[in-house]
């Protein structure tokens, strides 16, 4: 089961608002539990006696394993609380944390939930944890009735000073274990049960035996209970989805990586000019992803880190400025974020996406992840606001952080069927003189281009030469990001170095059959539009390219541009437009 809540948010100025509550844990692996149970049955080590142990009050025998207290079935576990003041002295914030176990009546099975919201716990790790606390196995009873606990690290002035594990059962029973030092060989913890028992005369007393835990139990407690909850949290970074994104953004504080894509219904412009994807660029209107963006974002639907390094446990409550309602969330202090280069002043990248479900009653689900700069040894730190974790991430998992914006886009300036082109206008300079030509295509009844008329020449031109010119336009690519400090307004006042403009015909879209092929049934007719590319020269070898679309209603998208095209390529386009008119060869594959 998944809970979702929606909160306000922004990028670097806001630390934590938009959070998705996630607590998705499957049933515990039976095989894993069996393996742990077997591992807990160990022989005594050099600290304990050998041979059969006579049980004292409170102790139990489970198979061949001796237990500090009677075995607790996982279905009867309610809560396990950890208190470890040693963590404070090492700078860890996890002095106190808890793990709750709850019964899922719908699925008729037990699921494990974190004592804090949002975390997704590792199913196998929780299985081991449940067995280790439910079957607290010892290899030896070091002292039956101890009077001096200090040699074992079990002499505490108060419960607050003690390292302890408290296990609560659904029937109300509670077991408290004090955890002391490890034995000299480092294979087990010395522990003491703080439960009460009755002696043979019926007198109640606090149990005073000292035990050496089995090495397998020690191993699991060392990696979880005595450490911090990060060890049992899944290093998931973003909310998993199979439905796709309604909005996707990947932003950088300093590099050439800033993209925002939005899922949209196909418009005339999308369908005609290569918008085969359901996503299109919105921060650079008019640039379409084609299949490239679809392929690359698939990896974000199940983004995982290598390991969890920190797990937020501090709770903060704020008031929503718009609604006036209070909301709470777990957060990391500035000091912890700064430690990993994830505080607002230094965080390098931010990934955000929204999933809008088809069911109108479903709230949109938002995922948000911050990434540090790349570390000297090649990995990144990632802060997942959904799961309250800081994870270590290998650079191979997030290599997209090293891409440029254009890597997510279809970088070719045109993606258009030649038969859709009613008019192609080329307006530039040839050998220092102005050059302008308009080519008008003529299609047959089947919509196939059969003739091309040159308005400047006043006659028809060779069809294959015109096709070669169009192929050359197809292969003209945006090379990379234009300088951010480029004065675009000044360039526009100067005027374009070259203008390419296409007026499309009305385009008929036919319905598809079950195999995806066109039928004879008309789905819709897309009215003709105009798309104009203008190239503004800003250096000897480069020109900014802008795109403007005029729809069927005369509405303009405005000129939008962020990338450059090489000047030699533009010169060749003008030269080859001239060659089409003069009946000269046009080689679309020749070097610029």
Image (cartoon, helix red, strand yellow):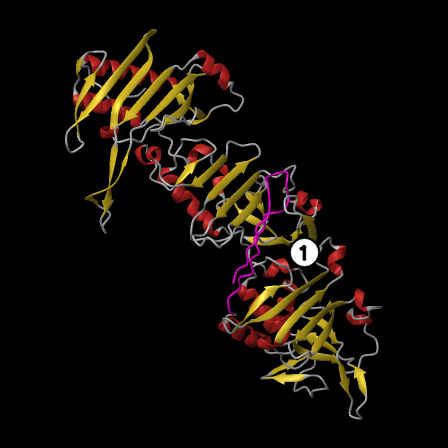
Residue 435 shown left or right of residue 125 in the figure: left
Q: Nearer the viewer, residue 242 or 147?
A: 242
| Residue 567 among magenta residues | no
Q: Nearer the viewer, residue 181 or 465?
A: 465
Residue 449 shown left or right of residue 187 in the figure: left
Task: Report the magenta stretch's main SS.
Answer: loop
Q: Nearer the viewer, residue 224 or 303?
A: 303
Q: Residue at x 30, y 28 (%)?
A: 474
Q: Residue beneath label 1, please?
A: 313
From this view, report whether residue 220 is shown above or below residue 450.
below
Residue 276 shown left or right of residue 420 in the figure: right
Residue extending furthest toward the bottom: 201
The location of residue 463, given as percent across then percent down, is 17, 22
The location of residue 542, given as percent across then percent down, is 42, 19
Q: Is residue 333 visible?
A: yes
Label 1: few (<14), some (14–19) or many (≥20) C-alpha neighbours in 10 Å: many
The location of residue 475, given as percent across then percent down, is 31, 27
Q: Nearer the viewer, residue 13 or 411?
A: 13
Q: What segment carries the magenta color?
A: 1-27
Q: Is residue 46 visible?
A: no
Query: Helix, strand or loop at disc 1?
Result: loop
Image quadrant where residue 344 sits: top right
| Residue 26 among magenta residues | yes
Q: Residue at x 59, y 83 (%)?
A: 64
Number of numbered labels in the structure image: 1
From this view, report whether residue 30 is shown above or below residue 349.
below
Q: Residue at x 60, y 43 (%)?
A: 9
């Amino acid at each position: 089961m998944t809970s979702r809540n929606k909160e306000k948010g922004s990028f670097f100025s806001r630390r934590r608002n938009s959070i998705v509550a996630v607590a998705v844990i499957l049933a515990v692996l039976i095989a894993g539990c069996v393996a742990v149970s077997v591992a807990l049955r160990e022989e005594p080590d050099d600290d304990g006696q050998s041979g059969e142990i006579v049980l004292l009050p409170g102790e139990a025998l489970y198979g061949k394993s001796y237990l500090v207290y009677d075995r607790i079935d996982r279905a009867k576990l309610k809560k396990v609380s950890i208190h470890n003041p040693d963590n404070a002295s090492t700078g860890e914030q996890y002095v106190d944390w808890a793990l709750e176990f709850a019964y899922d009546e719908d699925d008729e099975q037990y699921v494990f939930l974190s004592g804090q919201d949002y975390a997704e716990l590792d199913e196998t790790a929780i299985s081991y944890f449940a067995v280790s606390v439910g079957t607290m196995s010892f290899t030896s009873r070091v002292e039956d009735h101890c009077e001096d606990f200090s040699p074992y690290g079990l002499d505490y002035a108060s419960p607050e000073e003690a390292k302890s594990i408290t296990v609560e059962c659904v029937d109300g029973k509670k077991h408290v274990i004090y955890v002391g030092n490890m034995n000299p060989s480092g294979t087990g913890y010395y522990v003491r049960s703080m439960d009460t028992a009755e002696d043979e005369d019926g007198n109640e007393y606090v149990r005073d035996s000292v035990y050496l835990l089995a090495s397998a139990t020690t191993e699991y407690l060392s990696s979880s209970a005595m450490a911090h909850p990060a060890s049992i949290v899944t290093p998931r970074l973003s909310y998993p989805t199979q439905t796709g994104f309604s909005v996707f953004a990947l932003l950088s504080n300093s590099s050439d990586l800033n993209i925002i894509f939005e899922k949209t219904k196909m418009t005339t412009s999308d369908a005609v000019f290569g918008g085969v994807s359901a996503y299109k660029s919105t921060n650079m209107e008019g640039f379409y992803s084609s299949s490239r963006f679809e392929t690359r974002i698939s990896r974000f639907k199940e983004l995982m880190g290598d390991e969890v390094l920190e797990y937020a446990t501090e709770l903060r409550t704020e008031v929503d400025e718009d609604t006036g309602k209070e909301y709470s969330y777990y957060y990391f202090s500035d000091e912890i974020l700064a430690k990993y280069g994830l505080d607002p002043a230094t965080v390098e990248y931010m990934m955000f996406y929204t999933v809008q479900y088809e069911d109108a009653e479903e709230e949109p689900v938002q995922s948000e992840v911050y990434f540090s700069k790349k570390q000297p040894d090649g990995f990144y730190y990632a802060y997942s606001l959904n799961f309250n974790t800081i994870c270590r991430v290998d650079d191979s998992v997030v290599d997209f952080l090293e891409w440029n914006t254009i890597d997510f886009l279809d970088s070719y300036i045109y993606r258009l069927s030649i038969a859709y082109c009613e008019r192609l206008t080329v307006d530039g300079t040839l050998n220092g003189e102005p050059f302008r030509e308009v080519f008008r295509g003529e299609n047959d009844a089947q919509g196939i281009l059969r003739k091309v008329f040159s308005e400047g020449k006043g006659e028809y031109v060779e069809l294959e030469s015109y096709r070669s010119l169009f192929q050359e336009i197809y292969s003209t690519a945006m090379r990379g990001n234009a300088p951010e400090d480029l004065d675009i307004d000044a360039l526009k006042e100067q005027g374009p170095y070259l203008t390419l403009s296409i007026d499309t015909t009305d385009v008929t879209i036919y319905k598809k059959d079950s195999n995806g092929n066109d039928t004879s049934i008309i789905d819709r007719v897309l009215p003709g539009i105009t798309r104009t590319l203008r190239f503004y020269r800003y250096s000897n070898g480069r020109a900014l390219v802008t795109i403007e679309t005029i729809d069927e209603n005369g509405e303009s998208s405005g000129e939008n541009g962020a990338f450059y095209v090489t000047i030699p390529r533009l010169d060749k386009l003008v030269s080859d437009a001239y060659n089409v008119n003069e009946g000269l060869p046009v080689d679309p594959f020749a070097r610029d």
